[in-house]
């Protein structure tokens, strides 16, 4: 079984009527619900206001893939938690930051760049698949539309991805690398752009398919083979 933990800042769904109507129990609940339908996944949810920001050692030690949604409370996540998340990724935990988690502390720490971008509310997004043979693109059409969605535009200040699996085009003419893979240490990372809190994108079947595929792709290979990932440290005696 792939052990998935869905982490959510969980603020807008409690304080904004529009967002509350779309995600009455939180974005994390909707993501956990569609992932939980898969026989090979066991899904738990945590939120930022939980003790230790929801990421105790016990939670992290029992997580194969961590999904992260956040927007305006990044600075409230403790550095100790961020360091633990980064360490777990380097030792093999998969990491899937969604949408405005491009500015989350764990993602910027793993990228080493500002991760800034351009944005505008209420646009029309067309997503194109640029890497159809990638496992994350399995069963996803070559193009699909999300409308309305928030526009994210280049320049997106990230290191060069291992693969740009998806690219977005917006009616304003902007383009954006919206589905990017990276490896850090033993860990696999997939950043995926859609999911503005005021738009129902996490109910979209293609968005759900992509996140589901990404969980399977990001699950540590060693874990599926029954091998414990080693600590990332120099080999002694050489
Ligand atoms: Zn947004």
Image (spheres, rainbow, N blue to C red):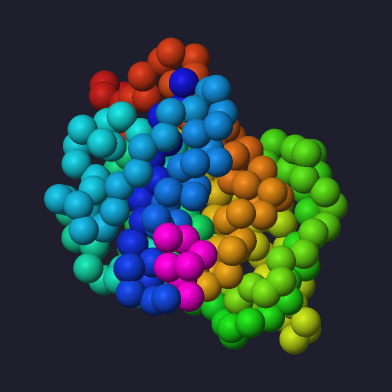
Task: Please state if 86 lies on the left or on the right of 179 as rendered.
Answer: left
| Quarter of the image that includes the C terminus | top left
Task: Please state if 151 lies on the left or on the right of 168 as rendered.
Answer: left
Q: Can I make out residue 102 in this image?
A: no
- Looking at the image, which is closer to me, 5 or 57? 5
Residue at 49% in and 28% down: 41
- Looking at the image, which is closer to me, 235 or 8? 8
Q: Can I make out residue 149 in this image?
A: yes
Residue at 61% in and 61% down: 201
- Looking at the image, which is closer to me, 101 or 146? 146
Residue at 56% in and 29% down: 38
Residue 111's place in the image compared with 236, above or below, is below
Q: Residue 207: x percent and y percent?
A: 65, 52
Q: Quadrant of residue 106?
A: bottom left
Tell me how many marks there are.
0
Residue at the right extreme, as displayed? 142
Residue 195's place in the image compared with 180, above or below, is below
Q: Residue 55: x percent and y percent?
A: 24, 45
- Looking at the image, which is closer to me, 115 or 61? 61
Q: Is residue 178 magenta?
A: no
Task: Magenta stretch: give its range.
Answer: 18-24
Residue 124's place in the image compared with 45, above or below, is below
Residue at 49% in and 14% down: 225
Q: Is residue 21 magenta?
A: yes
Q: Residue 14: x percent and y percent?
A: 33, 68
Instruction: Name the chief secondary structure element in magenta.
Output: helix
Task: Please state if 177 lies on the left or on the right of 192 as rendered.
Answer: right
């Amino acid at each position: 079984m792939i052990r998935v933990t869905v982490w959510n800042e969980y603020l807008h769904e409690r304080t904004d009527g529009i967002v509350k109507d779309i995600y009455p129990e939180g974005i994390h609940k909707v993501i956990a619900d569609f992932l939980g339908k898969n026989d090979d996944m066991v899904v738990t949810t945590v939120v930022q206001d939980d003790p230790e920001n929801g990421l105790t050692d016990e939670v992290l030690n029992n997580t194969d893939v961590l999904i992260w949604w956040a927007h305006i409370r990044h600075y409230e996540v403790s550095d100790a938690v961020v360091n633990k998340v980064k360490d777990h990724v380097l030792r093999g935990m998969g990491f899937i930051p969604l949408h405005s988690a491009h500015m989350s502390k764990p993602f910027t720490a793993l990228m080493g760049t500002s991760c800034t971008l351009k944005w505008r509310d209420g646009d029309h997004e067309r997503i194109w698949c640029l890497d159809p043979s990638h496992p994350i693109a399995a069963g996803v059409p070559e193009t699909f539309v999300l409308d309305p969605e928030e526009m994210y535009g280049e320049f997106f200040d990230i290191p060069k991805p291992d693969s740009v699996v998806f690219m977005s085009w917006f009616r304003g003419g902007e383009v954006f690398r919206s589905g990017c893979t990276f490896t850090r240490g033993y860990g696999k990372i997939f950043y995926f752009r859609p999911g503005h809190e005021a738009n129902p994108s996490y109910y979209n079947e293609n968005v759900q398919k992509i996140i589901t595929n990404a969980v399977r792709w990001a699950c540590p290979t060693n874990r599926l083979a029954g091998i414990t990932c080693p600590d990332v440290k120099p080999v002694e005696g050489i």
